[in-house]
Image: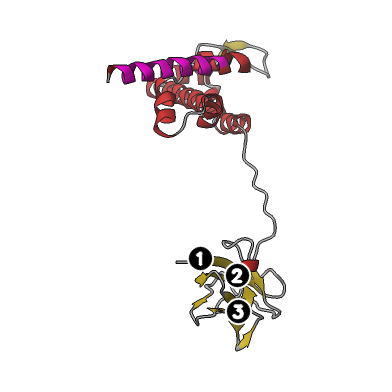
Amino acid sequence: MGQNTISGTVFDSSRINYVPGVRVVNKAGQFAITDSLGNYTITVAEKDSLAFVFNGKSTVKFPIYSVTDPRHFDVTLHVPYKGKYRVMKEVVVHTKSYKEDSTENRELYKKIFDYQKPTLSTSVNSATGGVGADVNEIINMFRFRRNKMMQKFQLRLEEQEQEKYLNYRFSKTVVKRITHLEGEQLSLFMMRYRPNYEFASNADELTFNQYVLNCYYNFKMEQLKKGAVK
């Protein structure tokens, strides 16, 4: 009764380096030791206080009533410390858009996407100016196994590209924003009302959002009917 948990991190004077091995002590003599990342957790009473002891030297006692955020009570010691871990500078993570991923994929498999079934074509001899059949095209026409594999690979790449586009257009984030569905109901809705590629690629944003909304109304009606039957 009347006990709380205080957690936080201990830094050195630079406010960059974590300080491990700091003894965090309450009035009753109970204590916790900071880990390699300077983190600690300790149980305290309502009228308790905490002191931080490092290398035999203690800080002033901090009364618990003055702690505004019990989950992040961080303390800076007036000592320098260089350990294995330190606070990183700000890191900005950029994610590629669907268009960037698609363009990169097209470039990577350009030969496959641009593949066309070999046909008999002519070529011009640069030296004589004579016109004749393209030997390479003739050879490729009779490479049946290669041609079949190239066509299958091309079809598979196009299918994967369409699937990625659908995942991008009909994502859980988009559907949740429109319908406010969550959890199992959201997953069920996504599976049942996934549109085809032709519609998703041709519909403007207003039309697409209206489609999701109409599907949501149907989905709720089905849920109500199931409830009534039960």
Q: Secondary structure at mark 3?
A: strand
The alpha-carbon separation of the residues under discs 3 and 1 comes to 18 Å
Whichever of callouts 1 and 2 sits on the residue coming sooner in the sequence is 1
Which residues make up the magenta segment? 210-228
Residue 60 forms part of the magenta stretch: no
Q: Amino acid at mark 2?
A: Ile
Please state which amino acid type lies under the numbered disc 3: Phe
Residue 184 figure quarter: top left
Comparing 64 with 195, the one in front is 64
Residue 45, numbered circle: none
Residue at left 56%, top 34%? 108
The answer to whether the residues at label 3 and label 2 have Cβ atoms under 8 Å apart is no
Eye-nearest disc, 3 or 2: 2
Cα separation, mark 1 vs mark 2, equals 9 Å
- Frontmost residue, 180 versus 61: 61
Residue lying at 64% horizontally and 47% vertically, measured from the top left: 93
**Could you say whether the residue bearing mark 1 is in a helix, strand or loop?**
strand
Q: Position of residue 150 (x, y in %)?
A: 45, 24
Residue nearer the viewer, 83 or 103: 83
Disc 2 crowd rating (10 Å Cα; few below 14, some 14-19, many 20+) is: some
In this image, 108 relative to 87: left or right? left
Mark 2 lies on a secondary structure that is: helix
| Other-residue count near label 1 (Cα within 10 Å), few / some / many at <14 / 14–19 / ≥20 | few
Label the magenta part by its dominant secondary structure.
Answer: helix
Q: Quadrant of the N terminus?
A: bottom left
Query: At which x and y percent is residue 38?
Result: 57, 71
Point out which mark residue 52 bears: 3
Q: Which residue is mark 1?
A: 4
Residue at the far bottom in the pictured view = 56
Q: Of marks 3 and 1, which one's residue comes earlier in the chain? A: 1
Residue on which disc 2 sits: 64
Q: Is residue 183 above or below residue 27?
A: above
